[in-house]
Amino acid sequence: MLSVPSMDLSNLYRHSVFRSRSPGEAQKELDNAITRHQLRWSKGEVASALYRRDLRHISLMALRYGAEVEVRPDPFESFALVQMPLRGSVEIECDGISMTVESGEVAVLNPRKDVRLLWQPQCEQLILKIPLSLMQDEACNQCSTKSSKCGSSSTPCGLDSAFKLAPHLYAPWRILVQQLVTLLPDQSQPSVHQAWIEQMEKTVAQFLVRHQPSALNIPVAVSSKTTDSNKALLPLQDKLQQLEAYIKARLFAPISLADLARAAGVSPRTLHLLCHRHRGVAPMELLRNLRLDAARQRLLSERSSSVTD
């Protein structure tokens, strides 16, 4: 059993849905538990497992794959997912927004078009599956332009496609989730009144809706003065272009791996993954190659220059 600070998930981990080392079985079980999706397995040994408990409307799950795996689910039609890695990390691309979610961080996904996730080896996540209707009700309650069409399929209230909670919200979020875990049905104890469980579920939905970037007037577009936390919203290609621009502006300066990661707005581990996947080399090799390219262009453009120069 795994846990993050100040959380006891034993009431969830006692209820196993499946454990398997078979990619095909994991695919089938997860299709039934969450939604239809494609899995593309990579490095590492498959050791998938799913634990799940349901409240009135919200489902709580702990999921792991073991190996690195790319997950491409169908766009969610009736629910949103909240993902919090208990260990490891996951890269998420959702409706053009890209983010890396590390252990203890919290991401909310409500894709309208497409979503892609890359789970790192040994990543395990605590996942909440929340009915979209519950999120929509809370969004309508805060909508400043409420009308008879508010919340309809043709005129939906604003729900962001994907976002990460701000770090100062992690502690209150863990408290809310811990309360949900405590409210899970237990045959050995008298059950809590269903009306109170429903109220807690509404509170969780309200917390997420009220703290999405659009509700806090935080722009998704990233400026040159963006903070490190907002850099995580840059599309992958923009991150790499930003990194390469940083290198080209400092061709003669000493640059470390940490400097490159800060310039891209990701962790060093994520930077390795991005560079290998999209450039075919490690970050420091990319740095060397860009400097060699610059030297080559100098030699071609200035005939008087020598290799030694």
Image: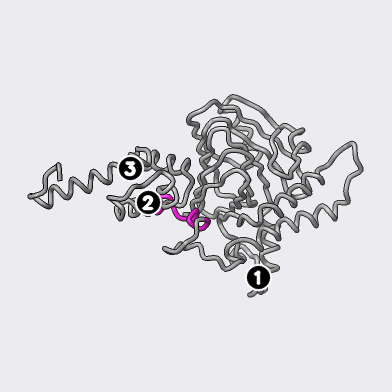
| Residue interval drawn in magenta | 229-242
Q: Nearer the viewer, residue 174 or 192?
A: 174
Marks 2/1: CA–CA distance: 39 Å
Near mark 3 (Cα within 10 A), the count class, few <14, some 14-19 or many ≥20, is some
Identify the disc placed on residue 215: none
Near mark 2 (Cα within 10 A), the count class, few <14, some 14-19 or many ≥20, is many
* Residue 24 position in % (x across, y down): 56, 28
SS under mark 1: loop
Q: Are marks 2 and 1 in contact (CB under 8 Å)?
A: no
SS under mark 3: helix
Q: Are marks 3 and 1 in contact (CB under 8 Å)?
A: no
Q: Could you tell which of marks 3 and 2 lies nearer the N-terminus?
A: 2
Q: Could you tell which of marks 2 and 1 lies nearer the N-terminus?
A: 1
Res 153 quadrant in image: bottom right
Q: Nearer the viewer, mark 3 or mark 1?
A: 3
Relative to 174, does residue 45 appear above or below in the rendering?
Answer: above
User: Which quadrant, please, contains the N terminus?
Assistant: top right
Identify the disc placed on residue 243: 2
Residue furthest toward the right? Answer: 190
Identify the disc placed on residue 286: 3
Tell me if 30 is positioned left or right of 134 in this view: left
Q: Are marks 3 and 2 in contact (CB under 8 Å)?
A: yes
Please name the residue that numbered disc 1 is placed on.
143
* Residue 194 position in % (x across, y down): 85, 51
**Which residue type does callout 1 highlight?**
Cys
Q: Nearer the viewer, mark 2 or mark 1?
A: 2
Q: Does the rendering let one see residue 248?
A: yes
Q: Nearer the viewer, residue 163 or 26?
A: 163
Residue furthest toward the left? Answer: 304
Tell me if 95 is positioned left or right of 172 in this view: left
